[in-house]
C-alpha cells in the first residue's frame, strides 16, 4: 500500500481527473449563480458534464490499484463540492 502512494500522487491520469473535477465545479458554480440564463449558460452546462465524464474516464484509465481509484473519485468529489460551495457564495 505504501509503495503505491508515490505512484498514485504522480499519476498523470489522476492529476488530469482532479483538474477536470475542479474545473467542472468552477464552471457549475458560475452557471448556477447567474440570474439570466442564456445560450452560453447551456453550453457551459454541457462543458461541465463533459468535464465530469472526462474526470471519471481519466480515473478509469489510471494504472493505480482500485482502492486508489476509489479514493481519487471520493477525493475529487469532496474537493469539487467544497469549491462549488465556496464559489457559490461569491457569484
Image (tube, rainbow, N blue to C red):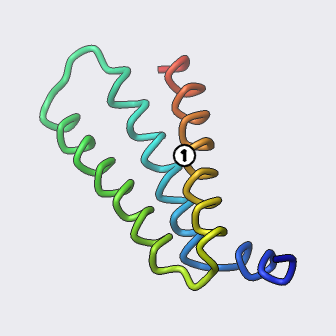
Look at the picture and state if 8 lies above or below 42.
below
Q: Who is closer to the viewer here, 46 or 8?
A: 8
Residue at the far left in the pictured view? 39
Please tell me whether residue 37 is drawn above or below residue 5 in the rendered image. Answer: above
Task: Decide if residue 83 is on the left or right side of residue 5.
Answer: left
Front-most of 55 and 23? 55
| In-image side of 58 versus 14 (left or right) | left
Tally of marks: 1
Q: Say whether residue 71 is left or right of residue 22.
A: right
Residue at the extreme right: 2
x, y (%) of residue 74? 59, 51
Of residues 24 and 36, the one drawn nearer to the viewer in this rendering:
24
Question: Residue placed at 55% from the left, 42% from the top?
Answer: 80
**Which residue is drawn at the image coordinates 59% and 79% (left, top)?**
12
Q: Secondary structure at mark 1?
A: helix
Considering only vertical position in the picture, is 89 above or below 79? Answer: above
Question: What residue is at 22 percent from the left and 34 percent from the top?
Answer: 41
Q: Residues within 10 Å of mark 1 (few under 14, many from 20)?
A: some
Q: Which residue is mark 1?
A: 77
Q: Position of residue 57 (x, y in %)?
A: 39, 70
Image location (x, y in percent) of residue 69: 58, 68
Q: Quadrant of the N terminus?
A: bottom right
| Furthest-top residue in this view | 35
Above or below residue 88? Residue 2 is below
Amino acid at each position: 500500500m505504501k509503495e503505491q502512494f508515490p505512484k498514485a500522487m504522480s499519476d498523470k491520469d489522476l492529476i488530469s481527473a482532479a483538474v477536470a473535477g475542479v474545473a467542472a465545479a468552477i464552471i457549475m458554480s458560475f452557471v448556477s449563480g447567474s440570474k439570466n440564463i442564456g445560450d452560453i449558460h447551456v453550453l457551459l452546462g454541457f462543458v461541465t458534464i463533459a468535464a465530469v465524464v472526462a474526470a471519471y474516464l481519466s480515473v478509469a484509465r489510471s494504472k493505480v490499484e482500485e482502492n486508489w481509484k476509489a479514493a481519487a473519485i471520493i477525493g475529487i468529489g469532496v474537493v469539487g463540492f467544497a469549491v462549488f460551495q465556496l464559489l457559490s457564495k461569491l457569484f
